[in-house]
Amino acid sequence: MSVTDTFGLGFMTFAFFLGAGNLIFPPFAGMLAGENMSWAMIGFLITAVGLPLSGLIAVARSKGNVMGMLPPFAATALAVAIYIIIGPAFAAPRTGLVAYEIGVRPFLEHTSAVYHIAGLELNASQMWSTLSFFIIAMLLALFPGKLLDNIGKVLTPVLLTLLVVLAISIIMFTGSAPSAPVGDYATQPLAKGIIEGYNTMDTLASLMFGMLIIDVLKKKGVSDPKAQTRYLVRAAIIAASGLAFVYVSLFFLGTSAGDLAKGTTNGGQILTNFVDHQFGSLGTILLSAVVSLACLTTAVGLIVACSEFFEELIPAFSYRPLVIFFSAVCALVANVGLSQLISISIPVLVTIYPVAIALVAITFVTTKLARPEFSHRLVLSVALVFGIVDGLKAAGVDMSALQFLPLFNDGMAWVIPTFFTIIACVAIPRHKAQQA
């Protein structure tokens, strides 16, 4: 692959990751963190940049078979859960909703017709917007062989240009002094930032996108596993650099927004207020373009990955009907509403994220394990058990009986048990036959 192709692959990877949550969560977190913004941002970068980068490298190290040490049933169940969460259940519908809230709604009248369908009240403008959004995503996803050209070399440079303009305007913005931190950001900003990074879902996505990128490389004629690993790592570094650039600028925006953030309930509103203040109607159009492109590229990647996975899992289903099916499901789920979708997703993410992180971590030490299959199963089981504890707590279930667990109040009771389980597995001595 040429240098241009390599950067195209990196830009494509960046575009797949940069979607709805990546734009709406950082500015709001920066506003709430206030004077503690630095610690909150570090925590956010750990889970929203460091872990996705590690996930892509883990997929490369495992030659695309990151779940290969698990029993077939467990590996399939985990993969299905991740694909459903990242695909039609939460992440993909959220891209369409954020594209509507920031990219379309500011141009509409405040009132909108309401459709009553099957006992549900559906906002007419939201319904037609999300339907149009996922029709476009479906058409792009129907031709995955052109992903590198259509997304990596065309859409993403436009997206990057718009983001750079936005970032420069933030740097030149003379904002207010940081306010006092709010809630958990006052007492535990690092831990809160780490948990907030879960909302991007990018660590889960990295396990899917890594395999998708390998498939793109194969279609480009790169069949050697070592070459695939090399190009995937390069793409991961390019994508991680871009994500860090976006997050840092958005955190600073949230912290210095001042009056522009008053009365806002999410980062999208802070962004809208900022660009309206700086650029007027031109700024609103700019923000609309940034959000729409970011959300569209992510939606395409998610639909492609889900369709290819289930096509391989269930041979009776073919790729194109699956693309149409998942696009339709996403359009349907999107009409639940943004705030409801986010609130439902948080306990699920707090439960499944520890398993994904544990999988990435154990993959990096697989060569040092005396019993790799047993170690993978044990570590992931521990992460799942304690992840369920954190998930139930996030869902509002009374888990005070387990408050003695380290990091329980931070929502990360899984960390210490999982870490020591990995250490114990590495410490298991090899048999003489293995050493020989």
Image (spheres, rainbow, N blue to C red):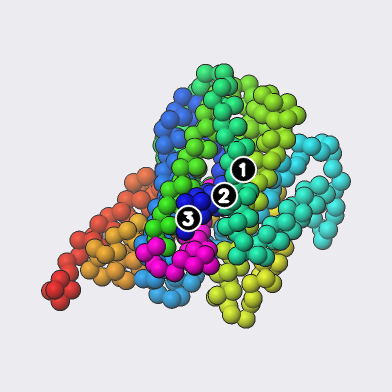
Classify 318 as above or below 233: below
For mark 2, what is the residue? 15
The residue drawn where x is 83% and y is 58% is 117
Q: Tag 1: Cα neighbours inside 10 Å, few (<14), some, or many (≥20)? A: many
Q: Are marks 1 and 2 in contact (CB under 8 Å)?
A: yes
Q: Earlier in the sequence, mark 1 or mark 2?
A: 2
Left or right: where does residue 159 sit relative to residue 335? Answer: left
Q: Which mark is residue 2?
A: 3
Magenta span:
200-227
**Can you tell which quarter of the image residue 371 is in?**
bottom left
**Residue 415, x across and y down, in percent:** 36, 50
Q: Secondary structure at mark 3?
A: loop
Q: Tag 3: Cα neighbours inside 10 Å, few (<14), some, or many (≥20)? A: few
Mark 1 or mark 3, whichever is nearer to me:
3
Q: Earlier in the sequence, mark 1 or mark 3?
A: 3
**Can you tell which quarter of the image residue 254 is in?**
top right
Alpha carbon distance from label 1 to label 3? 22 Å
Alpha carbon distance from label 1 to label 2? 8 Å
For mark 1, what is the residue? 159
Q: Are marks 2 and 3 in contact (CB under 8 Å)?
A: no
Q: Which quadrant is the C terminus positioned in? A: bottom left
Q: Tag 2: Cα neighbours inside 10 Å, few (<14), some, or many (≥20)? A: many
